[in-house]
Image (spheres, grey):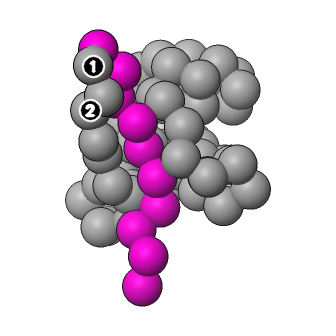
Amino acid sequence: MQEQYYGIGETAGKIYKFLELKGEQTLAKAEKEIGVESDLFNQAIGWLARENNINFSKIGKNVKISLLKD
């Protein structure tokens, strides 16, 4: 179980750094660019959302994510 938590946290860090570098992105593009399995990606997105680090916006059928500004 501890290994799974580590994987989620590591993936959350990758997503955070990706968004710092690229700015707002669709969930699909972020997942593809980061290159992890969907379940792990979604758990990491949940982690970031729970920690109040990301913002979601829906544009048409696309859901975009961005970092929350302090």
Residue at 46 percent across and 52 percent down: it is 66
Give the overall secondary structure of the magenta segment. strand
- The quadrant of the rendering that contains the C terminus is bottom left
Where does the image place residue 68, in percent across and percent down from the top left?
40, 68
Q: Is residue 34 above or below residue 52?
A: above
Amino acid type, residue under disc 1 in the picture: Gly
Mark 1: secondary structure: loop
Residue at 61 percent across and 52 percent down: it is 23
In the drawing, does residue 33 fall left or right of residue 23? right
Where does the image place residue 14, in percent across and percent down from the top left?
66, 49
Q: Quadrant of residue 64?
A: top left
Where does the image place residue 37, in percent across and percent down from the top left?
56, 17
Circle number at residue 58: 2
Labelled pair 1, 2 in contact (Cβ < 8 Å): yes
Distance between the Cα atoms at labels 1 and 2?
6 Å
**Residue that numbered label 1 is attached to:** 60
Q: Is residue 13 above or below residue 28?
A: below
Label 1 CA crowd tier, 10 Å (few <14, some 14–19, many 20+): few
Q: Quadrant of residue 50?
A: bottom left
Circle number at residue 46: none
Residue 11 on the magenta span: no
Q: From the viewer's side, name the closer residue of 53 and 57.
A: 57
Q: From the viewer's side, name the closer residue of 25 and 30.
A: 25
- In the image, the segment drawn in magenta is 61-70
Amino acid type, residue under disc 2 in the picture: Lys
